[in-house]
Amino acid sequence: MTKAARDLVLENFAWIHGHADVWAIFRDATALNAVVKALVEPFKDGGITAVCGVESRGFLLGAAAAVELGVGFIPVRKGEGLFPGEKVERRAAPDYRQQRNCLRLQRHALTPDDKVLLVDDWIETGNQAAAVRAMVSECGSGWAGCSVIIDQLSEEGRQAVGPVQALLAFSDLPLYQVEEEAGREVRPAVSRGLNCWLGPWRCPVGPGGLTGETPGHERDRRNGDIASGVQR
Ligand SMILES: O=P(O)(O)OC[C@H]1O[C@H](OP(=O)(O)OP(=O)(O)O)[C@H](O)[C@@H]1O
Ligand SMILES: Nc1ncnc2[nH]cnc12
């Protein structure tokens, strides 16, 4: 019997230092194949004309989903990379790491005849998806919704992104075993990830203090524990 996509996701998913390693799912040929097929299945007869994907995990999954659906792929760039032609742009509201991304889509990629499906690995605040939806709408195209591996949306976030199909809910993921990874007892293994980055920090030490970015300092949102001692 063929293993279900969600089982293969759970088999391959890993936490590394509190961060979700979704890339591990893509490394496994069987998991990747099953996941892509499962992501598009609910939309097979939905009249989708294009799949959108947000850089970078969304590029990989979105392009594979587009091939599976037999439609083209529309990239939404998040970085500064070269992207020829006229663009539609949105500064998305903060993502799950409190970062504000400038999302860009090529204006000529969409027409009013299009009906777009956004494919991504994970949706949390929904702010990237909401920004993509707004850009698609600005082009006059239709919106089918989102297909993702992991759904971590709040009810409020869900309103903004339209119908969402997911292979797993966030609560289906294994817990992150903090003390196992550290090899010593640090605190109870209660967390389902430390993915909320604190972003810019300020240390009130020395003349004028110090500032910087602390991607390595994360907060466990589940129990509100500041793991690094750095304050937001
Ligand atoms: O629902 P939101 O809070 O808006 O976040 C969703 C986005 O977060 C992840 O990307 P990430 O920023 O981690 O970039 P990556 O794909 O380059 O790893 C994920 O692939 C989504 O695109
Ligand atoms: N908690 C999370 N970990 C990894 N990628 C994500 N994308 C959205 N939320 C995420």
Image (cartoon, helix red, strand yellow):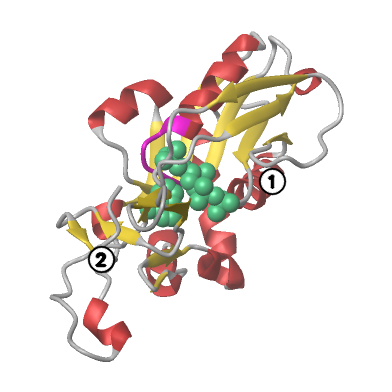
**Earlier along the polypeptide chain: callout 2 or callout 1?**
1
Disc 1 marks which amino acid? Ala
Q: Residues within 10 Å of mark 2 (few under 14, many from 20)?
A: few
Q: Is residue 47 visible?
A: no
Dot 2: element: loop
Disc 2 marks which amino acid? Ala
State the residue at coordinates (68%, 28%).
Answer: 104
Q: Which one is nearer the viewer's eye here, 125 or 218?
A: 218
Query: Which percent across, then down, holds residue 120?
Result: 53, 44
The correct choice, above or below, for 114 with respect to 190 in the image is above
Q: Residues within 10 Å of mark 1 (few under 14, many from 20)?
A: many
Q: Which one is nearer the viewer's eye here, 232 or 72?
A: 232
Which disc is residue 202 wearing?
none
Residue at the limit of the structure toward the bottom, as seen here? 183
- Check whether the beta carbons of the residues at disc 2 and disc 1 lie within 8 A of each other: no
Mark-to-mark CA distance, 2 and 1: 37 Å
Q: Quadrant of residue 154?
A: top left
Residue highlighted by disc 1: 63
Asked if residue 121 is among those painted magenta in the image, a careful observer would answer: yes
Q: Is mark 1 within 8 Å of ligand 1?
A: no
Range of magenta residues: 120-127
Dot 1: element: helix
Residue highlighted by disc 2: 227
Q: 129 left or right of 55?
A: left
Q: Which one is nearer the viewer's eye here, 177 or 111?
A: 177
